[in-house]
Amino acid sequence: MDGQEFTFVNDQKDARVASRKYGKFGTVGKNGCGMIALYNIERAANQRTQFESFYAARDRIKTNLFGLLGTRPSTIGKNLQKKRFHVQRIPIANVADAEAFDGVIVLYWWIFGAHYVAGIRNENGTYTFYNQFSEPYAMPLSDFIAYLKQRKLHPHRVWGIRFPEKQN
């Protein structure tokens, strides 16, 4: 990536990643939000995780319609569990229960399809949400869900994630 390594990826349309293949027919810029969410969670858990090596192993992430419809929702938990993350699906109605996780991944629907966003927990209990088509947002998970609904976006799934080294 021309010598510049990401900390977190906040824009899948960033020129450094957008044109890379995702699945057989997709690209990161158009279809890679699920992969970006998984990368951001892994990066938060392990500062040594580099985008280049994560991207090189992208074949472990199952896609829909050869990448044209992005990441399969079923692959989110499975990929993280294989790396010893604890993953729990949180019903949208109970998002306050997820406030204590190390990270979350939110999947929501909108008129043009679906989108994944990763939230990394801050010391003050809020989450910083990445790849939400703007600067990162920092807010409680319940406020982020309300923010999505206010904008006529439809939250579909939330995964609460505990990092491997923080499990008892």
Image: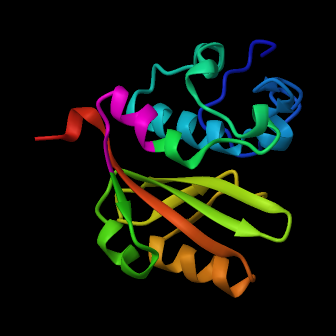
Q: In the displayed structure, would residue 29 be above or below residue 104?
A: above
Is 43 on the left-hand or right-hand side of 3?
left
Q: Residue at x 59, y 15 (%)?
A: 57
Q: Residue at x 71, y 76 (%)?
A: 153
Residue furthest toward the front?
Answer: 65
Query: Quadrant of the rendered structure where residue 152 is?
Result: bottom right
Residue 164 at x, y percent in the picture: 26, 34
Q: Residue at x 77, y 31 (%)?
A: 66
Is 66 on the left-hand or right-hand side of 127?
right
Q: In the displayed structure, would residue 23 be above or below residue 104?
A: above
Q: Is residue 140 visible?
A: no
Is 56 on the left-hand or right-hand side of 103?
right
Residue 55 at x, y percent in the picture: 65, 20
State yes or no: residue 85 in magenta: yes
Quarter of the figure that contains the C terminus = top left
Q: Magenta part of the protein: which range?
A: 77-87
Q: Residue at x 17, y 40 (%)?
A: 167
Query: Quadrant of the rendered structure where residue 106 is?
Result: bottom right
Of residue 35 and residue 71, the one placed in the foreground of this image is 71
Quarter of the figure that contains the N terminus = top right
Residue furthest toward the left?
Answer: 168
Residue furthest toward the bottom?
Answer: 150
